[in-house]
């Protein structure tokens, strides 16, 4: 399923089948194992991993924004907090969401992600401009809240930018890619080999 999601070709190898007319099945254990498998597939989804990284990044951004607002001012604090979290966010998504390891294209990925960061900075800065246009007496709490909401909303554009441009697989050598759960890619092909085994059908 993971290989199929990533558009890889799957090579099937036949196995020996020995029928066992006295087979048994544990319905509870089988159902539990199936649900655990579904959970693993769900957790391996790039969107789920991106969302988890986004939650952590947003929390870090909020803490930095509060800490830096007083000495730097709201606009400079916003830019600094976004810049600091953007580097960690890019690296985490590079490895965990898009499965790219090693140094190939590392600098290029961060430079391209910087353009995506500028878009996020523009969105959050514009949200402040709109807020001040509507309420010139807005306090620190309201400004911080608006910036956090704007930053969270910008994750949509960030994901599209990272997936479609920064970490597009055509920009990454196959040797630098590792699929989820250990599925490795070489020239867009995956070989799922199985040893010969005895198998028995399940009886209801």
Image: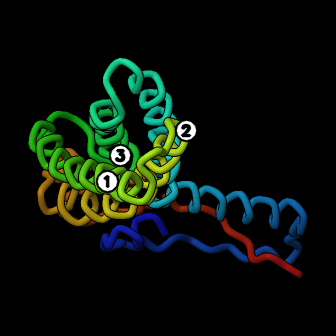
Disc 3 marks which residue?
93
| Residue 32 left/right relative to 72 | right
Q: Is residue 202 visible?
A: yes
Residue 36 drawn above or below residue 13? above
Tell me where residue 17 sits by quadrant. Answer: bottom right
Q: Is residue 82 left or right of residue 35?
A: left
Instruction: Give the distance between the C-alpha atoms of the residues marked 1 and 2, in whole angstroms.
Output: 16 Å
Please name whichever residue, 197 or 83, is drawn nearer the observer in this view of the structure: 83
Which residue is identified by label 2? 141
Of the two numbered discs 1 and 3 on the same chain, state the one appearing first in sequence: 3
- Disc 2 packing (10 Å; few <14; some 14–19; many ≥20): few
Q: Is residue 164 above or below residue 113?
A: below
Q: Residues within 10 Å of mark 1 (few under 14, many from 20)?
A: few
Q: Which residue is mark 1?
A: 129
Q: Residues within 10 Å of mark 3 (few under 14, many from 20)?
A: many
Query: Which one is earlier in the sequence, the residue at label 1 or at label 2?
Result: 1
Task: Please tell me whether residue 61 is drawn above or below residue 97 in the rendered image.
Answer: above
| Residue at position x 36%, y 34% in the image | 74
Q: Is residue 130 left or right of residue 197?
A: left
175 or 126: which is nearer to us? 126
Q: Position of residue 99 (x, y in %)?
A: 33, 48
Quarter that holds the C terminus? bottom right
Residue positioned 36% across, 72% down in the render: 10
Residues under labels 3 and 2: Cα distance?
A: 30 Å
């Amino acid at each position: 399923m993971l290989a199929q999601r990533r558009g890889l070709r799957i090579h099937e190898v036949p196995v020996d089948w020995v029928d066992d007319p006295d087979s048994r099945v544990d319905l509870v254990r089988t159902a539990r194992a199936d649900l655990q498998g579904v959970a693993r597939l769900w957790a391996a989804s790039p969107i789920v991993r991106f969302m988890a990284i986004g939650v952590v990044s947003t929390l870090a951004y909020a803490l930095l924004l509060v800490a830096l607002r007083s000495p730097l001012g709201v606009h400079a604090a916003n830019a600094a907090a976004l810049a600091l979290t953007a580097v960690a966010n890019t690296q985490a998504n590079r490895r965990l969401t898009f499965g790219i390891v090693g140094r190939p294209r590392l600098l290029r990925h961060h430079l391209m992600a910087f353009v995506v960061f500028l878009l996020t900075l523009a969105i959050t800065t514009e949200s402040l401009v709109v807020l001040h246009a509507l309420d010139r007496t807005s306090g620190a709490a309201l400004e911080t809240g608006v910036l956090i909401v704007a930053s969270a909303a910008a994750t949509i554009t960030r994901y599209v930018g990272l997936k479609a441009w920064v970490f597009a697989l055509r920009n990454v050598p196959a040797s630098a890619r590792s699929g989820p759960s250990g599925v490795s890619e070489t020239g867009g092909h995956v070989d799922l080999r199985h040893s010969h085994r005895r198998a028995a059908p399940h009886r209801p």
